[in-house]
Image: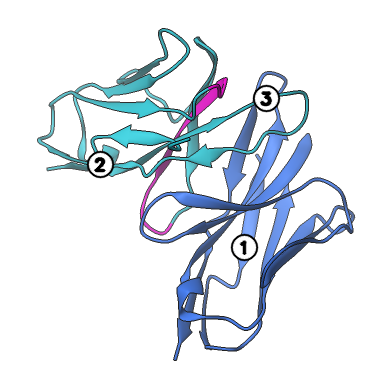
Chain colours: A blue, B cyan
Amino acid sequence: EDKVVQSPLSLVVHEGDTVTLNCSYEVTNFRSLLWYKQEKKAPTFLFMLTSSGIEKKSGRLSSILDKKELSSILNITATQTGDSAIYLCAVSVNTGTASKLTFGTGTRLQVTL
Amino acid sequence: DTGVSQNPRHKITKRGQNVTFRCDPISEHNRLYWYRQTLGQGPEFLTYFQNEAQLEKSRLLSDRFSAERPKGSFSTLEIQRTEQGDSAMYLCASSLVAGGPDTQYFGPGTRLTVL
């Protein structure tokens, strides 16, 4: 059975800190890995990673995939209170007809003043 | 582009009643997915459509659940004879498949509470 594990489960940091969120996976027919940010409603897309070792960056957020280690990290530098959310890692698996997502349980990040 | 929309946003029903949710995907997106999310968990795949064809259903989708996408645009998810265990957030996502990995964009969800 496909499995995605995120750590830590929750994290409290002070504004300005840098955080690293981890995601590891065990799936068959890996297609891509995606990161989403979820506040009170729908997951909002952040990054999609398909190739090992290539960093994706958007402002203070960046992410990289390690296919050898079956893992990915999401970095957030100079955190702000608006970064408080649940960060979801999902792996897209190719089932032949679909590319459905298997999600981890998420990392709940709280940024305090 | 207004994004993925879902209606209603909240639904409270009594056990045993039927409920129907609607999802309008991003226009021109050919794939539409339904997920269910319970508290403290990530979303779980339920089913997906490529245009109007329902191509895969999760074993989570019992016989009481049915989904349609009759014209390849909006989709409906119906739950018959609701049970308290059906209480969850039902998320819809859409994507455009054009040869490579597709990115799924999510709607705001419908939160179902079964009393």
Which quadrant of the structure image shows residue A75?
bottom right
Mark yes or no: residue A28 visible: no
Q: Residue furthest front?
A: B1
Q: CA distance from mark 2 to mark 1?
A: 28 Å
Q: In the rendered image, which residue does mark 3 sit on?
A: B97
Q: Residue at x 65, y 24 (%)?
A: A98
Q: Is residue A84 left or right of residue A63?
A: left
Tag 2 and tag 3, C-beta contact below 8 Å: no
- Which of the chains bears the disc numbered 1? A
Tag 2 and tag 1, C-beta contact below 8 Å: no
Q: CA distance from mark 2 to mark 3?
A: 27 Å
- Please state which of residues A76 and A66 is positioned toward the viewer in this rendering: A76
Q: In the rendered image, which residue does mark 2 sit on?
A: B9
Amino acid carrying mark 3 in the image: Val
Mark yes or no: residue B48 visible: yes
Amino acid carrying mark 1 in the image: Gln
Position in image of residue B33 (x %, y %): 50, 29
Q: CA distance from mark 1 to mark 3?
A: 27 Å
Q: Residue at x 44, y 16 (%)?
A: B73
- Please state which of residues A73 and B45 is positioned toward the viewer in this rendering: A73
Q: How many marks?
A: 3
Q: Is residue A7 left or right of residue B16?
A: right
Magenta part of the protein: which range? B28-40
Position in image of residue A53 (x %, y %): 89, 59
Q: In the rendered image, which residue does mark 1 sit on?
A: A6
Position in image of residue B21 (x %, y %): 28, 28
